[in-house]
Amino acid sequence: MTALPFEDTTDFENADRGFIDALVPAVIMGKDDRVVYDNDAYDFLKGECPPTASASLWRQAQLCSRQGLYEVCEGVYQIRGLDLSNMTLVEGERGVVVIDPLLSVETAAAGLALYRRHRGERTVTGLIYTHSHGDHFGGSRGVLPRGTEDGVPILAPEGFLEHAVSENVYAGNAMTRRAILMYGDRLPKSADGQISAGLGMTTSNGTISLIPPTLDITRTGQEETVDGVRIVFQLTPGTEAPAEMNFLFPDKRALCLAENATHNLHNILTLRGAVVRDSRIWARYLDEAIEYFGDGYDVAFASHHWPTWGRENVVTFLSTQRDLYAYLHDQTLRLLNDGLTGPEIAEQMQLPPALENSWHARGYYGSVSHNVKAIYQRYLGWFDGNVAHLWEHPPVEQAKRYVDALGGPDQALAKAREYVDADDLRFAATLLNHVVFAAPDHTDAKQTLAGVYDRLGHGAENGTWRNFYLTSAMELRHGVNEITIDTTNPEMAMALTTDMVLDSIAIRIDGPRAWDDDLTIDLVLTDEDRRHRLTLHNGALTHRTVTTPRTEAALTLTLTKPQLLGVLAGKGLDGITTTGDPSLLTRLFSYVTKPDTGFPIVTP
């Protein structure tokens, strides 16, 4: 850490450049007087770094905690520090084009109000989603309230809607539960608690919305004009998100890099869970951006952090980011092909000095360690080739056997404390985790493990690692943190295609209970002019589109998609035409389970 250039204050100068005004107080409230976001809670970061934090992460937190309205260049403004992400506002001929309206309706509305306080009551005349992650579209209704979106173009990269919605549906419950640990939003905001997520401070916990795009960007080189503002796009699918794009405002000489290049090493596989990203193609798109946009800009900004001014500075920034992802990819593959496993490569991997000492390449959000393992996973999957790992016991049964081999929980705890005293916190955590899983009611083991997680968290440079460790310690001491973010907005359901709606039911079927049932239901969607046949057989619910059914379904419902969503919400069959046995629907729904929003992670 001593090699890092703490004397370089360029990032602080850039983070403060263009400052216009802050939100005072920086506390954003939601319904029922619930705090949705509180940036004032981070005032403690104005002090010196304490022993309970990495000096490098403390510095990053100081930068990310700056909040308010900033001018990027003439006609381009950003709201920063009022959610995990940034909201950018580009002034047009009649109003303002909004890029990435934050995660929550409440924070987006507060950001837009702050902008209007200084730039006038400009109408939102366009909306751009840079990519398919929730913190870049969830606040859309905060800038375009219901009834104001008519005639407003909403631009997004091709495939945006499918990926934006599927990520929040198929594995959404597990991802959201793990995000509590990743972002640490339940931790106290303090020098020994949550200080940052690296990419931003933390996520807001307000209302998520989604207004579907009206204009897809389908190719690099596509040009669009929104409210008199010219935009040139570069598609970058498979980078930081499955659907993502960079774009240039040629008349303003401003380049938007979405989340493809931010002031940290990003995730190849986020700790909350996601599809593994392609670091190889990520590097190639960054290289393409350098060449494609040429000398057409004087400033580059992104959906997180602060801008970079000066074309040469941007090229240096992009080149370093490109080399970072390319190096991690290529060296992981080189060592993988020499027979090393993911953990072995992660332990051995060292970045070149020029990357290691670049502030914007530090592992505040992604880390070299878990990114290397993700690259390994992308190519070779979970199995490392050692057959001893092919059919291991699951965690609880494995833990019982480890602890038994050590003489029981008390003896295993005593041995773990020896490793704590020897400062081998990594193995102490491993051993104590076995004790907790073998004897979940062993209070001393849980308290000792929580203390180890505290120390590991306080020493972590990576913001999400710190949050995972400290939130895990909190849950060991006080129990599970359940999900509170509001994902029930009906617009999210309406954004699902009918196929995705049916998929979301299929993944919740209790297969063993449905093994012996056999039923067929047709859904005739009049507003889609499609017939969907649902078949429950051998515990699996499958569906397909049929034109002329060769056999008659036992139940046919003729309805619209909104009516289908109403049926799924338990509103009954009023106004819906039915043919056959309506009780089959009740029978089908009897097999549909409700996900546990507070499932344990650090205990069995």
Image (cartoon, rainbow, N blue to C red):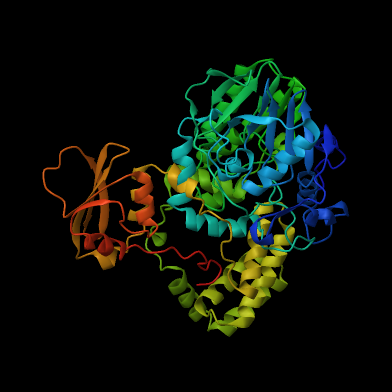
Instruction: Tell me how many marks there are.
Output: 0
Q: Quadrant of residue 113?
A: top right
Q: Position of residue 326 (x, y in %)?
A: 58, 33
Q: Is residue 104 above or below residue 584?
A: above
Of the pair 505 and 422, the residue shown nearer to us: 505
Residue sitting at x 72%, y 38%? 360
Q: Position of residue 455 (x, y in %)?
A: 72, 65
Residue 333 versus residue 142: which sits nearer the camera?
142
Residue found at the very far front of the displayed protein: 575
Q: Name the quadrant containing residue 154.
A: top right
Q: Residue furthest left?
A: 550
Left or right: residue 333 versus residue 32 is left
Note whether residue 534 is visible.
Answer: yes
x and y percentages locating residue 18 in the rendered image: 83, 31
> Where 50 sits versus 107, above or below?
below
Q: Is residue 104 above or below residue 88?
A: below
Compared across the picture, whether 498 is left or right of 147 comes to left
Q: Residue 526, located in which quarter of the rendered image?
A: top left
User: What residue is rendered at 72% in x and 41% in y?
Assistant: 111
* Residue 317 rendering spot, x and y as whole percentages: 71, 29
Does residue 592 appear to the left or right of 257 in the view shown?
A: left
Q: Is residue 146 left or right of residue 503?
A: right
Let me know if residue 356 appears in the view.
no
Residue at horizontal 84 percent and vertical 57 percent from the top: 44
User: Residue sitting at 59 percent across and 84 percent down?
Assistant: 410
Q: Nearer the viewer, residue 561 or 549?
A: 561
